[in-house]
């Protein structure tokens, strides 16, 4: 009886529904739902706007480097400059590194967007996180005061690019995550989820019964041991 109860306790939990396309990524987005294709186009537009905004930010920093110079001075406050490296050189290098970092981020997002167009469900999750980030940046841009440094047209263009990117990103991910697109991403349908939940509830009841049986068995064994000691 003890062995039987232990064997029942060691039973594995129900297997959750599989997530992801069973045949892997689609060769292309040709057969993707219209919402997915529209959402992917929106994210390609986000990438283009972000790349243009990064270039405008570089131009603005090079034309009027006061804000960036102040940041560099704060970061280098406790560190002496290397020999042969001036503050202007460091500021210019920082501006270029910022551009490269932004372009790499854009390239990564475009790669993930391409995978999403082919049914990549994990890539879709990363784009969801990116959408939240861009939306927050757009919101901050709306309520923040304009910087003291920088030419007014460039400041307006950079701010507009940030806001436009955030809005389009949210619209794009909304289109991509529509319930009708579940099959394209290999997501379990409602029936599968309900069946899994039912199995989990049944398994939970079985475990409760097993624990109760085990508790009774221990109590019985303790009582038998007590009686033998008398």
Image: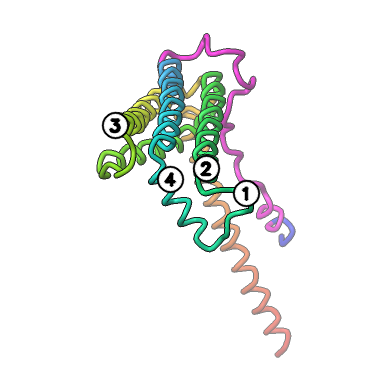
Q: Kindly identify the residue that appears in the image at 71 percent across and 53 percent down.
A: 7
Residue 131 numbered tag: none
- Element under label 2? helix
Q: Which residue is mark 3?
A: 156
Q: Residues within 10 Å of mark 3 (few under 14, many from 20)?
A: few
Q: Position of residue 102 (x, y in %)?
A: 50, 34
The residues bearing labels 4 and 2 have C-alpha atoms spaced at a distance of: 8 Å
Marks 4,2: beta carbons within 8 A:
yes
Q: Which residue is mark 2?
A: 94
Of marks 1 and 2, the one in the foreground: 1
Q: Residues within 10 Å of mark 2 (few under 14, many from 20)?
A: some
- Assign a secondary structure to mark 1: loop
Q: Residue at x 35, y 29 (%)?
A: 161
Q: Position of residue 157 (x, y in %)?
A: 32, 28
Residue 68: assigned label: 4
Residue pictured at 44% horizontal, 48% vertical: 69
* Secondary element at image label 3: helix
Q: Which residues are magenta?
A: 5-34
Q: CA distance from mark 4 to mark 1?
A: 20 Å
24 in the magenta segment? yes
CA gap, disc 1 to disc 3? 36 Å
């Amino acid at each position: 009886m003890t062995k039987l109860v232990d064997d029942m306790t060691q039973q594995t939990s129900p297997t959750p529904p599989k997530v992801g396309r069973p045949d892997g990524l689609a060769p292309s987005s040709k057969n993707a739902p219209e919402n997915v294709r529209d959402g992917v186009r929106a994210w390609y537009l986000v990438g283009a706007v972000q790349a243009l905004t990064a270039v405008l930010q570089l131009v603005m920093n090079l034309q009027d480097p006061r804000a960036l110079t102040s940041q560099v001075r704060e970061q280098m406050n406790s560190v002496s400059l290397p020999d042969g490296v001036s503050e202007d050189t460091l500021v210019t290098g920082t501006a270029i590194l910022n551009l490269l970092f932004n372009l790499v981020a854009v390239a990564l997002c475009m790669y993930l967007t391409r995978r999403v167009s082919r049914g990549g469900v994990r890539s879709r999750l990363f784009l969801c996180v990116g959408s939240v980030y861009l939306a927050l940046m757009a919101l901050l841009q709306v309520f923040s005061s304009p910087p003291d440094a920088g030419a007014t047209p460039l400041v307006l263009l950079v701010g507009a690019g940030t806001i436009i990117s955030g809005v389009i990103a949210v619209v794009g991910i909304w289109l991509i995550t529509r319930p009708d697109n579940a099959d394209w991403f290999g997501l379990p349908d409602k029936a599968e989820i309900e069946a899994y939940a039912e199995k989990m509830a049944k398994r939970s009841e079985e475990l409760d019964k097993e624990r109760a049986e085990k508790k009774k068995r221990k109590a019985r064994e303790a009582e038998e041991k007590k009686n033998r000691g008398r």
